[in-house]
Image: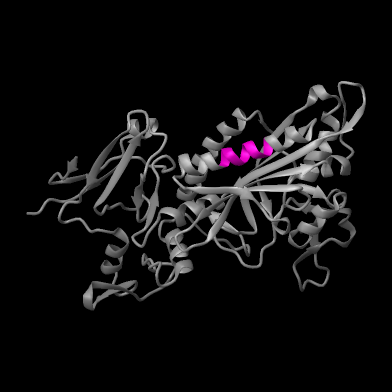
Amino acid sequence: MYFRPNSILFILVLNRYISYAKSFTFTAIRSAIPPATAAAAAQHRRHYHHPATQSSLSFKLQSHPSTITTIANNNNNNNKGNNGNKKGGGKDVYQGNDETSDFITPRSENYSKWYNDIIRVTDLAETSPVRGCMVIKPWGMSLWENVKQDLDTRIKEHGAENAYFPLLIPKSFLSKEAEHVDGFAKECAVVTHHRLTADPSGEKGLIADPEAELEDPLIIRPTSETMIWNMFKKWIISHRDLPLKINQWANVMRWELRTRPFLRTSEFLWQEGHTAHATAEGAIEDAEAMMNQYALLAEEMLAMPVVKGCKSPSERFAGAEETYTIEALMQNGWALQSGTSHFLGQSFGKAFDVTFQDKDGKQSDVWGTSWGVSTRLIGALIMTHSDDAGLVLPPRVAPVQVVIVPIEPKK
């Protein structure tokens, strides 16, 4: 099928095929910059494979002769004085300010710069005044919301219910599980005072009020195992209360020295699931099931193949007996951890004295799991599909499914 009208370029994604196709070789929507700003398309072929019929639909999107192949390079040429220039052989040469240029560094030259350029040019996110933290802009947030919607359905089908727990965790809670506190101690942000006051000398403006120091400092959550297991102690009494499966959509803080948008930031968005079980077998089955759900999310929605496996003992989550992981291979050869699920054994149950009365009337310790994915998936999505021309998105996660670009006819 060829779409090549004289005055309008139609960029179409056939949703009926996408909705029925459970596997596909490659499907994508290209966006050099967000549709709200501009859109243009080069020549691309899409294949949609329907496993039930073992047939496929192929169609080619072909631009009008007057269409620029990539909007990013087009913008460079239109702003030669500030952002770009054309020199021998038609090669783009960057000349300008990183924050205002639409130039995208080729992957072969500098992969990390290419990744940052994609995020900047496509308006997904930008740095914030807070060191190590990013501002996720509407176009980037819409990607996370689509992932969240799909995953939330999977989590509920898994039997977990959504809840919300405090952002602040007493420092004494983290001290109850030795391995856990050792693993997160260097990443914790600590609240030590509950109010500010004016500096009596007038030199420092506002200062922490010396009279408002907390007896038990509060940790901005790096993860919520300690808070949730403290609540499990109140909620679990007998075997009839098990398994108990709780999920939370939240933000967390882990102080980072070297950050990169979506991949590693001090504050990030995620979901964290926490479950309690009567048996070790039940807990292990739960952890493995969620690893499989994360793999299906990556492959079916993000068109991102992953490898499932277990972390080495040195890489396990702090306090876990086993950590299951999905790893995605990026274009530069990196293996990116994209989701983890942990078998916690009885460590947190014992640390917080969570027991239940079994069928024989005896008190037993519970077995636990935790599992989560974060906005790192957006970074993985970028590095899996995008190229030197701009951002490439699989249709199932793309916020915009149809883009109409007016092209003035030649006179």
Left or right position of 219 against 78: right
Question: Which quadrant would residue 294 be assigned to in this image?
Answer: top right
* Above-or-below relation of 313 to 26: below
Left or right of 377 on screen, residue 286? right
The residue shown at (71%, 42%) is: 370
Does residue 215 appear in this view? yes
In this rendered view, identify the residue nearer to me: 200 or 149: 149
Residue at 40% of width from left, 45% of height from top? 394
Magenta stretch bounds: 286-294
Predominant SS along the magenta part = helix
Q: Is residue 247 in sight in this rendering?
A: no
Q: Residue furthest bottom?
A: 88
**Which of 290/252 is in front?**
290
**Can you say which quadrant of the picture contains the N terminus?**
top left
Residue depicted at x 66% and y 31% = 160
Q: Does the stretch in magenta take in 156? A: no
Instruction: Give residue 362's position: percent from left, percent from top.
Output: 92, 26
Direction from residue 283 to residue 177 in the image, left or right:
right
Which image quarter: residue 259?
Answer: bottom right
Q: Position of residue 355 (x, y in %)?
A: 88, 32
Q: Splitting the image into 4 quarters, where does residue 225 fall?
A: top right
Q: Is residue 146 left or right of residue 366?
A: left
Q: Quadrant of the C terminus?
A: bottom left
Which is nearer the eye, 56 or 142? Answer: 56
